[in-house]
Amino acid sequence: MDCQRAREGFVDALTGNLGEAERAELRMHVEQCAACRAERDAVTGIWSALETLDAPAPLPSLPERFERRLRRESGKPRRSGWVWVAAGALAATLVLGFGVGYGWRARGAGDGPATGEAAPPGYLMLLRAGASVPATEARAVYHEYAAWARALASQNRLVSAEELADGGTWLIAGADEPTAHPTPQAASQPIVGFFWIQAASVDSAVAQAKDSPHLRRGGTIEIRAIQRR
Amino acid sequence: MRDVRRGDLDALGILFRRHHARVHGLCFRMIGSAAAADDLVQETFLRVLKYRRGFQGRSRFTTWLYRLARNVCLDQIRRDRRDAALARRAAVELVDDALPDVAWMGDERAKAMWAALQRLAPEKREALLLSRFHDLRYEEVARICDCSVGAVRVRVHRALKELRDALDPGVNTQWTASEPGKGSSTP
């Protein structure tokens, strides 16, 4: 066995794709060749180092979540088979990445209240700045917000979500007439986005907000009921 | 799977409980997000039901399942690419003075390895991950990835070479001394 074949053989051996005879031949070569021993050690090192890529365990509740989703989607009236499921799954992936990763309008995409049914009160989760993230983590953050948005949508709670542009204009009552001002310095945590959700009560809205990645990342959420008259 | 082919949702739930952790691991390492993996593993099993009549039993169920998972991941990667410009924009706009919770990434060695892995082309990444973490031979990886055995071999070889090239030699040396993964296969 020459060095070229030996070096190719290291990977094949590690991946379990080398027969016993070839492995024996490889071992014999390595015993006699210092350069190939070094190469073997380097390849083995990288192979072993892949162990560091621990995958977190799935959420313990994932099977129950999947089964609920399955029952909900399979219970929908549909013309045939799994056309509706495919459409629902597609809708659930329509997260448009704005800002920190949300940007969603779910009206009509989920299994919302049937026509004629009274919609529950709506709440705005106003996301205030404070969440911070290095550039290298943008994608992970994006997925966190997207997953949260998807979870809200799958529960038919999300109405809309958007990032807001920087800055803003405040109308402040003055002695004479309201005057437009830039965002006051005092507003140290400007609103950077919002989630418009449907919830039966403010407690329910608070419970939804507590799952938000925005809080985990140091942001603040202000919850405001949408006034219905 | 026979019951699933008849549309038995309970049977699909059983399959999910039995196999979802390994599918989740593949999705996580392909995409790099636990939250996304939670979603992708569900999408994979929805596809099990959607395409259940396509499973003829000529291959192992897990081979077919990994193939569905792999396609779900590639779809996600395509969406990520589409959104990449927006994500980059987000990174610029966000404050950058604090680290997020990246406990799942482990230590510095793991972060470096993770970054190098994510820079691999998806076809190399999937071949390497299936071989490394799912104990699959080239033949089975080829069936999952719908390519030749030779192509899988080349992808795994190139993936490992690119990882070596990408990683700090100092860190590499440190890894060389660490505990082997598949110790029995060490040449």
Image: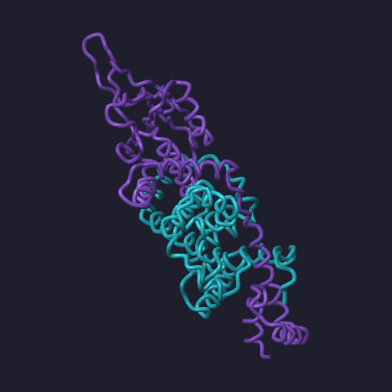
Q: Is residue A202 above or below residue B57?
A: above
Horizontally, residue B116 falls left or right of residue A171, namely: right
Q: Would you say B13 lies left or right of A205 here?
A: right
Identity of the residue furthest to the right in this view: A31
Tell which chain the image draws in purple: A
Is A95 or B137 nearer to us in this picture? B137
> Relative to the observer, which residue lies in front, A120 or A182?
A120
Name the image quarter holding residue B52.
bottom left
Q: Position of residue B161 (x, y in %)?
A: 57, 73
Give the percent coordinates (x, y) of residue A198: 38, 28
Where residue B103 sits: x, y (%)?
Answer: 62, 45
B141 or A79, nearer to the observer: A79
Q: Could you say which is closer to the camera, residue B167 or residue A146?
A: A146
Q: Can you see residue A82?
A: yes
The structure residue drawn at horizontal position 66% and vertical position 84%, both measured from the top left corner, is: A6
Q: Quadrant of the C terminus of chain B?
A: bottom right
Taking the spot 58% from the left edge, 71% from the top edge, the residue there is B160
Q: Residue at x 48, y 35 (%)?
A: A214
In the image, what residue occupies the spot 32% across and 46% down? A78
Q: Is residue A95 visible?
A: no
Q: Which colour denotes chain B?
A: cyan
List the single residue furthest toward the bottom.
A1
Residue B29 image point, x, y percent: 55, 57
Side (left or right) of A29 relative to A187: right
